[in-house]
């Protein structure tokens, strides 16, 4: 019976290590560099993790929202990738800085010229966008992630109120309130400066991924240490009881 208890403790410990050491479910997402204020400009990063052990991510296609079109989208150049910006005619022209705009960005496509995003790493794709709409709290982008084995993962599912989180959610950019300093928030010049500021960050993504991996390893080793300690304590308690019974 005592041996069974010890075995049970060991089984729980092993299961804990497996759960905590398993990689968290990751997906293509979008986050602003700083804030994305309504009516202003922002630099946003499309973050693409590699979820496969035997293939690299070699292509990313991001479709821009048509219900809230963005007239300006300038991607940051990334070493090892080519980029193509596609624009489409608008059914209804929009006004930007006092001018009527009859086309907007409909899609941006990044294609790897080398190995792409290899297993165990992620890549950020920065884009300066604007002017952000003032009549919505979020923008939904749909993305296609292509691997070197020709597998395509479609991150296009929209979260619905009252429903479970979709398996392949579309990237969603949350918009903050308009800047108090001005109706349109950051200027186009500020956006360009922000785009330059993230250049070094984009270049260091491999190092960031390695740091994340090291941090995960440290957490797992810490858990293993705790589990081993618990097993030792359990063994000591059982051994003490055995001597007392004797």
Image (cartoon, rainbow, N blue to C red):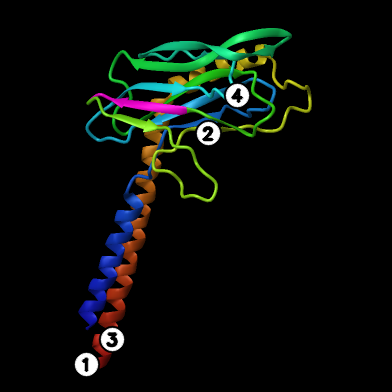
Question: Mark 3 = which residue?
Answer: 241
Identify the mark nearer the N-term, 3 or 1: 3
Question: Mark 4 = which residue?
Answer: 68
Secondary structure category for the residue under label 3:
helix
Q: Which residues are magenta?
A: 142-148
Q: Single out the residue that lies furthest toward the front.
A: 91
* The stretch drawn in magenta includes residue 127: no
Side of 161 where 214 appears, left or right: left
Between 101 and 72, the residue placed more toward the observer is 101
Q: CA distance from mark 2 to mark 1?
A: 66 Å
Question: Mark 1 = which residue?
Answer: 246
Q: Residues within 10 Å of mark 1 (few under 14, many from 20)?
A: few
Q: Which mark is residue 172?
A: 2
Q: CA distance from mark 3 to mark 4?
A: 70 Å
The answer to whether residue 182 is above or below residue 24 is above
Q: Which mark is residue 165?
A: none
State which mark lies toward you, 4 or 1.
4
Give the quarter of the figure containing the N terminus.
bottom left
Secondary structure category for the residue under label 1:
loop
Image coordinates of residue 246 in percent, x first then y, are 22, 92
Side of 203 where 23 appears, left or right: left
Q: CA distance from mark 4 to mark 1?
A: 79 Å
Within the image, what quadrant is residue 205 found in? top left
Q: CA distance from mark 2 to mark 3?
A: 58 Å
Q: CA distance from mark 3 to mark 1?
A: 8 Å
Image coordinates of residue 214 in percent, x first then y, are 37, 40
State which mark lies toward you, 2 or 1.
2
Secondary structure category for the residue under label 2:
strand
């Amino acid at each position: 019976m005592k041996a069974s208890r010890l075995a049970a403790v060991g089984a729980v410990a092993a299961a804990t290590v497996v759960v905590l050491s398993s990689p968290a479910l990751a997906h293509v997402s979008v986050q602003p560099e700083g804030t994305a204020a309504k009516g202003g400009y922002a630099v946003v990063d499309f973050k693409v993790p590699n979820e496969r052990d035997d293939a690299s991510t070699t292509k990313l296609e991001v479709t821009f929202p048509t219900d809230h079109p963005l007239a300006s989208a300038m991607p940051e150049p990334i070493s090892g990738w080519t980029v193509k910006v596609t624009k489409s005619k608008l059914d209804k022209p929009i006004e930007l800085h006092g001018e009527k705009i009859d086309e907007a960005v409909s899609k941006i496509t990044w294609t790897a010229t080398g190995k792409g995003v290899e297993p165990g790493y992620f890549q950020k794709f920065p884009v300066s966008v604007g002017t952000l709409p003032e009549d919505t709290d979020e923008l939904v982008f749909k993305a296609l992630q292509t691997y070197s084995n020709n597998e395509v993962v479609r991150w296009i599912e929209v979260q619905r109120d009252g429903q479970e989180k979709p398996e392949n959610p579309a990237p969603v950019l949350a918009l903050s309130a308009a800047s108090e300093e001005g109706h349109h928030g950051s200027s186009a010049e500020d956006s360009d400066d922000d785009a330059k500021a993230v250049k070094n960050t984009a270049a260091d993504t491999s190092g960031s991924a390695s740091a994340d991996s090291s941090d995960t390893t440290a957490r797992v080793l810490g858990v293993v240490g705790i589990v081993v300690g618990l097993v030792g304590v359990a063994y000591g308690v059982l051994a003490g009881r055995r001597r007392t019974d004797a």
